[in-house]
Image: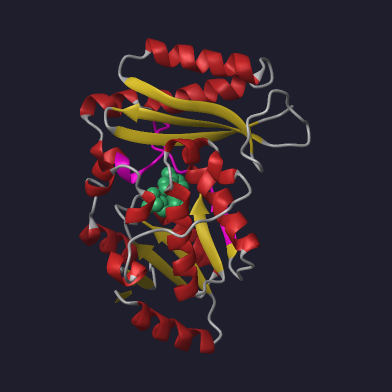
Amino acid sequence: MNIFNTKKEIKSYLTAEKQKNKTIGFVPTMGALHKGHLSLIKEAKKKNDLVVVSIFVNPTQFNNTVDFVKYPKTIENDTKLLNNVLCDVLFLPSAEEIYTQNIVSDKFDFDGLEHQMEGKHRKGHFDGVATVVKTFFEIIDPDIAYFGQKDFQQLQIIKKMVQKHRLNTKIKGCPIFRENDGLAMSSRNTRLTETHRKAVPFIYKILEKVREQFNVNNTLEITEWVKDEFKKNTTLELEYFTIAEEKTLKSEKSKASDKKYRAFIAVFAGEIRLIDNLQLKNN
Ligand code: AMP
């Protein structure tokens, strides 16, 4: 695996590879890699001649300094995992390399997608994400970029960015990888205390029950039920729960048979904030 730290190095390597007509699949990550990340890389390997993975803990997408500072960093293990899955290129830039002078985001308009859910609770988060993803796309110019449905709102926002800025990269959404007990894999899971780790499978259990209720009760009743369940749980704190339409990410009171819906949730386990979502079947 080739490892590059600078834009100049990776650009000149990839330009030469593109001249040989090689296609490029790109998987942006913040490192502390787990099976969820590896599933994206494996998917990229199937469809592209070269797979580029970036590891960059992007300062501008964190609205919480403690979360940024304590974000897990396991670069040695990450490199081993990437070699095991035959990743071709690892891009490992510094913040100065990506932002050159000021570490600030550009401002984006995503037709309102950015104002829902994570956008409400993490001010500036999606401007930070879009700034870094757009910069990476300019450096790497990938044919296909892979994003997890774990961050479903992010996936929809990146698709919108590509459409609005007329970028050439195709965006592929990949399924959520879970632990055996249902917990969605996340780099932040390693920071959970033993007590919180035991408590968090509750999040997916609630989502499964929401899926069961979706054809029986209305979204308001389901939302109230979820809030009540979390009030009874003394270990976890619900930040938000909402059932939203997949394209607009807006919550709707009534269901339309031609639309797809998902349940979205954000929960605090101590100081660790976890998000998850589940597609609902609209019979
Ligand atoms: P992160 O390193 O958390 O920024 O994630 C990098 C990419 O991996 C994003 O596209 C995430 O949506 C995706 N990802 C993270 N966790 C999972 C998971 N459990 N299953 C599938 N994809 C994931």
Q: Residue at x 31, y 42 (%)?
A: 64
Question: 129 and 225: which one is in front?
Answer: 129
Residue 122 shown left or right of residue 241 in the figure: left
List x then y, in percent, for residue 256: 77, 30
Residue 43 horizontal side relative to residue 82, left or right: right
The magenta stretch is: 171-188
Question: Residue 85: in sight, yes or no?
Answer: no
Please tell me whether residue 71 is drawn above or below residue 84 in the rendered image: above
Q: Residue at x 26, y 62 (%)?
A: 80
Compared across the picture, whether 194 is left or right of 3 comes to: left
**In which quadrant of the rendered view does residue 85 lie?**
bottom left
Residue 160 placement: quadrant: bottom right
Expressed as whole percent of the image width and height from the top left, the position of residue 27 reads: 45, 62
Q: Is residue 75 magenta?
A: no
Examine the structure image and report whether residue 185 is included in the region drawn in magenta.
yes
Q: Overall secondary structure of the magenta stretch?
A: loop
The residue closer to the viewer here, 131 or 268, is: 131
Quadrant occupied by the C terminus? top right
Picture layout, residue 250 above or below residue 84: above
Q: Residue at x 58, y 53 (%)?
A: 109
Question: Could you say where residue 168 lies in the image, as x and y percent from the top left?
Answer: 61, 71
Q: Which residue shows up at 52% across the image and 63% down it?
A: 145
Is residue 194 among what the camera can see?
yes
Which of the 4 quarters of the picture holds residue 92? bottom left
Give the quadrant of the N terminus.
Answer: bottom left
The answer to whether 153 appears left or right of 37 in the picture is: right
